[in-house]
Amino acid sequence: MYRSHDCGELNASNINIEVTLAGWVQKSRDKGFMIWVDLRDRYGITQLIFDEKRTDKAVFEKAKSLGREFVIQVKGTVIERESKNANMATGDVEILVTELTVLNESHTPPFTIEDETDGGEDIRMKYRYLDIRRNPVKNNLLFRHKVSMEVRKYLSDQGFCDVETPYLIKSTPEGARDFVVPSRMNEGQFYALPQSPQTFKQLLMIGGMDKYFQIVKCFRDEDLRADRQPEFTQIDCEMAFVEQEDILDMFEGLTRHLLQEIKGVTVEKFPRITYDYAMKTYGNDKPDIRFEMKFGELNEVAKHKEFPVFNAAELVVGIAAPGCAAYTRKEIDALIDWVKRPQVGASGMVYVKCEADGTFKSSVDKFYDQEDLKNWAEATNAKAGDLILILSGNAHKVRTQLSALRMEVATRLGLRKSDEFAPLWVVDFPLLEWDEESGRYHAMHHPFTSPKPEDMALIDTDPGKVRANAYDMVLNGNEIGGGSIRIHDRDLQSRMFTLLGFTPEQAEAQFGFLMSAFQYGAPPHGGLAFGLDRLVAILGGQETIRDFIAFPKNNSGRDVMIDAPSTIDESQLQELHIKLR
Amino acid sequence: MYRSHDCGELNASNINIEVTLAGWVQKSRDKGFMIWVDLRDRYGITQLIFDEKRTDKAVFEKAKSLGREFVIQVKGTVIERESKNANMATGDVEILVTELTVLNESHTPPFTIEDETDGGEDIRMKYRYLDIRRNPVKNNLLFRHKVSMEVRKYLSDQGFCDVETPYLIKSTPEGARDFVVPSRMNEGQFYALPQSPQTFKQLLMIGGMDKYFQIVKCFRDEDLRADRQPEFTQIDCEMAFVEQEDILDMFEGLTRHLLQEIKGVTVEKFPRITYDYAMKTYGNDKPDIRFEMKFGELNEVAKHKEFPVFNAAELVVGIAAPGCAAYTRKEIDALIDWVKRPQVGASGMVYVKCEADGTFKSSVDKFYDQEDLKNWAEATNAKAGDLILILSGNAHKVRTQLSALRMEVATRLGLRKSDEFAPLWVVDFPLLEWDEESGRYHAMHHPFTSPKPEDMALIDTDPGKVRANAYDMVLNGNEIGGGSIRIHDRDLQSRMFTLLGFTPEQAEAQFGFLMSAFQYGAPPHGGLAFGLDRLVAILGGQETIRDFIAFPKNNSGRDVMIDAPSTIDESQLQELHIKLR
């Protein structure tokens, strides 16, 4: 062992003992007669001192040559520091060094290894191994480990069995695009990397393994939007002999446990809202409920006057920005500009100031009287001091726009607090969504999701109205998990494939094994999957998943550190029976 | 929830309570007036009873229609069984059923779902989801979960951080063949699936994460020998600021913990033997030391007479089969036939019976006297009653042959007990091995393994003699883990690549990122990886890893259940910029 202690553990109680430390030179200060070196490892920083008077001359000279990020080993005595640093765990002591060994030298790093670095994203990714030495990145990785361990412990204690499902599976083009792997031993054939272990976990349920989980890498070859990764990690879970309520209870329990154990936050029973309610009340299906500003629909109280904009609109809807009645004209104009940005796309915004004296002042005073505005305040739950912001237009579009505005206002008001956690369930998702481009229905969740029995009658007459036994867990405005009760009946599954545009031959070729399995005693089952990258980021009080992944890829799917993907040898292509186009 | 209890938990203490159970019909016996059904789930079997007198007529009739593997839900009362079954946890009770719901029917399964099944390997793999319902397979998966959890807990408690490394990496043809993944977004380029996270864990050490582990899938596109899988699971570990001794201690601790916690077996400090000693004493580098039969080299005491076979041999070497002096001529001939099989390849075998009276009787009595045979008995540590088996020939070949014979004899004598565990370390492996075919050295472990400092002088003069800081953990005749202290110096790594036949350009193209990282303060580090599939199988007292993998592939790398690999659409090939040859 190269060390007797790590760089985070020595304190006043260790004074006068002999220690051996090893780590990296964080920085050194050379005062001529005295050299201080901050020695860093995973656990902290300990100050070393080399003193012209007390240190052997050769050691002292060697200390002069130490550069940033040199790896060194020192032996010495723990002594009390003259000027203590209360901000450091080891701030009461320093090591008077007697022996110094340089274990490895270092070039000057391309960016500073500090909490606040001068390195941009690109350079930090290229030298990710140096970036990981920085506390923010290192702590994120340690945090991720802690979350994974808690998840495993909790689920294992609940009787879940961690089963590893295969990575080399079969391509099923429904859903996102697969990554494929040419087979050398089976000419002209390909494996696919799993987009999720969905069918395997269902087969495990059919196999009687009634509670399954796995923390598992999944793969999607999609054009990468910001903060998406081609490989990502799921906490994948499935249970048999359960109804939706059992699954919600179980994974609400897991999430509550994580919040308690990891963040020390106690959360009561999660609110459960329907998809329809979420869309109407928050304009999206993953509402951030750390703050109010619920939508107030104003059609009934705003379309009775001569204001043509509202009268022409399918939906007039507003939110009450708390305490914003005092906004200046300039501040309000900034918000109007914001909603008019192409990314949001509103054509304008009406506002109402709810004054402290109970009166209202609006941008449409010419059309509406105080009584009208009072009705609007009631509908949006606005109180004195609030500012009502109103959008109008096509119902679907205006909800999306107001949802964006709601989040923006909350951000500006500091209401999206990273140490507050407001989880909820969104349930009763539609089974299908109509895709204009392909002119057919797509599964909103996936083709294995079961319709609600009470909506089955609609499946032939009005499929778009059928609700699914599907649910999402939402935390702070992010979908962190989602799942469904699955179909376990061959005929219903077959019907679903037909609805989704599969020919019977396609269904058989791609999912024949599952339909066959349904014929041998498939139990009722369901489950869900959490996105671990996002869950960890949100629990960590951040929103960028890349910061919680050790070696992430960039937006072109490249690992810029190892320079992958890359070309391969012609001989490899030959063996795989493929060639480049 | 479809059940109030599971099928393994009800006993006499539950008599008279109302319960709801759900599961599969294991079997039913219809006596006309009485029907018994064994209901099975993951946790056990509970007997249901339908009685013409006590059961509602409609329920009774429905019970008649139940077939094997139907999924049912029943409500009923726990009653005392008339004829108890002490072999079953639930054997004191049965359920007098009042309500019966068929949740799903089942075709007759293609093989019996019993501990001893009539299904062959192929059919069980095709219907693996049915195979998993069988106790032996189910219990193996539960056992694997238990081992993984213990590994994670132990390493986490020791301060190891579980870091997920990427699956889409870069192809590096050194070593085994890579599986590759064409990149859609980077035309003409490919990712590779990792053969191990080797370089990433080294980068984590350079990143300061000083204790890393991961239970991770790895991939090798090799022609599959029996019991190899194209995807397999490693417990992958690495530590920084450590020497070989620290690593051996740490992972000996882990293994001892597993044996204690999982098997209740207490193991003392693991023996450590060198590679050279293992080869000389057991004829291979993964000796099974649950039993003795160490090799006795006989050159000095067997080449002084006129027996031409021994005199012409490079090595004469024997083992003492304990208690086998009474073997009949027929039994001995069977052993001789065995060693002459092409798979072993010996040309013959000499034997010596060590009689109870201290005399010896051998197949070469015409050449050797009692004094000679006594010397052989001493060299092979044979006692009265033992049978000495002697092979001769080329040293390397004869060791391999005798090693095979030693294992065969142990198997015949029942010395390879599945509930006995004899772990050891084999250390001081050679750094390089000469490959006749390519006419160059290959890395015996991998190119990142560091030579022993004391052997560095040989690296230019006699590279084959250089020993590595490399070690294997061996358990019951299987290598269950292996690792090394790594190179952390750019120049030495560069020299190693040259020795292995890389041009500087190839080294830079494939491993430039690692060599670059060595220049920014790489600490001394090393680690090891366990093969989880094999470790679990051996701990489980078995040797076939396939039995401990939920969804294994066959020897052609096919998943016969889902029928993968398979052809993909032309449009997929186009998007990936490749075509079939």
Image (tube, coloured by chain):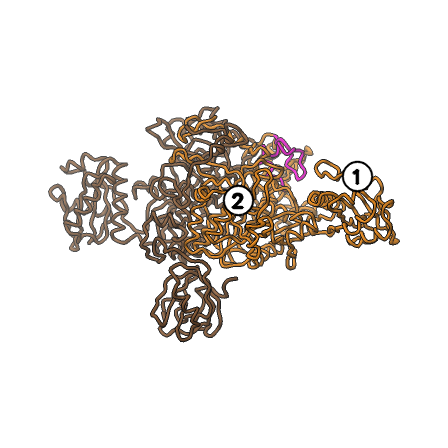
Chain colours: A orange, B brown
Number of marks: 2
Magenta residue check for A111: yes
Instruction: Say which mark, if any, is on residue A500.
Output: 2
Residue assigned mark 1: A334
Q: Considering only vertical position in the picture, is A345 above or below A568?
A: below
Question: From this viewpoint, is residue B257 visible?
Answer: no
Q: Where is residue A458 in the image (x, y as percent from the top left)?
A: 57, 52
Q: What stretch is highlighted in magenta?
A: A108-135
- Amino acid residing under circle 2: Leu
Q: Which of B530 and A413 is in front in this view?
A: A413
- Farthest residue, direction left: B366
Q: Distance between the residues labelled 2 and 1?
A: 45 Å
A44 or A355, nearer to the observer: A355
**Crowd class of label 1 (few under 14; some 14 to 19; many from 20; radius 10 Å):** few
Residue B522 figure quarter: top right
- Residue A556's place in the image compared with B349, above or below, is above
Q: How far across and down, in percent of the image, does residue A329 sit?
A: 85, 41
